[in-house]
Amino acid sequence: MATLPSSRIVTYEQWLKTPTVEDAIEEVVNGEIRVMPANKWNHAEIVRRTRGQFEAQLDERQVIVMDTNFGLIIRTKPLTSRTPDIAVFKVETIVERDGYIHSAPHLILEVNSPSNWPREREEKLLAYASLGAPELWWIWPEKHSFDVHHLEGSNYRTTTLTAGVLKPLHFPNVQIDTARIWTD
């Protein structure tokens, strides 16, 4: 998503005291606050359908599937915080501090928006890799495809899927039917 300009660079401590913007999504990249508009309906519907498939197959006492606007701290210096569309955590690995998550999800899903710039996508991939998120699915609604990224060392290895069933590495009993995700 395109971001609104912000020239103010903040530290983690300053950011903790900054009021949030209502009905917007906020991320911080290298100390720069980026405020983005709320997701459009199609984007939100893809997130809802995908989350529903996960939740139907997982035990909520052991796994949390989060799709709300929450801060995932990548690093505190310089501050980088992301807001993934969906993050799937094993409960015992969650580290919460100051109201934010400071641990890597086992799976991150991002739904591409027409306003996403290639640079933004690369920044997110680098950030999630640096956090150690072992798997990331980049969903392309306009192409009806998924880029599936698996962390190898400090970089992601990528494969593309256009139809079928996705099986996350850390949740072997889960099968996501890609045909049930699309809204058109």
Image (cartoon, grey):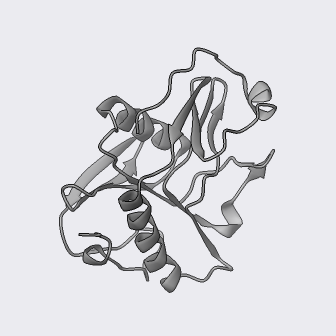
Give the image location of residue 119, x and y in percent.
34, 29
Give the image location of residue 89, x and y in percent.
59, 64
Residue 62 in sight: yes
- Write the residue at 70% across / 67% down: 92
- Write the residue at 35% across / 45% down: 156
- Write the residue at 41% across / 33% down: 2
Say above or below: 110 vs 54. above
Q: Locate the N terminus and report the quarter of the image it occupies.
A: top left
**Quadrant location of residue 160?**
bottom left
Of residue 85 and residue 129, the one placed in the foreground of this image is: 85
Q: Left or right: where does residue 145 sit relative to residue 33?
A: left
Give the image location of residue 98, x and y in percent.
81, 44
Residue 154 in sight: no
Of residue 22 and residue 121, the one placed in the foreground of this image is: 22
Q: Left or right: where does residue 68 sit relative to residue 96?
A: left
- Write the residue at 47% across / 77% down: 52
Say above or below: 70 vs 67. above
Say above or below: 50 vs 94. below
User: How many numbered discs?
Assistant: 0
**Quadrant location of residue 74?**
top right
Q: Left or right: where does residue 61 sit relative to residue 116?
A: right
Q: Left or right: where does residue 86 sit relative to residue 110?
A: right
Of residue 105 and residue 16, the one placed in the foreground of this image is: 16
Say above or below: 100 vs 91. above
Q: Locate the C terminus and report the quarter of the image it occupies.
A: bottom left
**Quadrant location of residue 162?**
bottom left
Give the image location of residue 83, x and y in percent.
55, 47
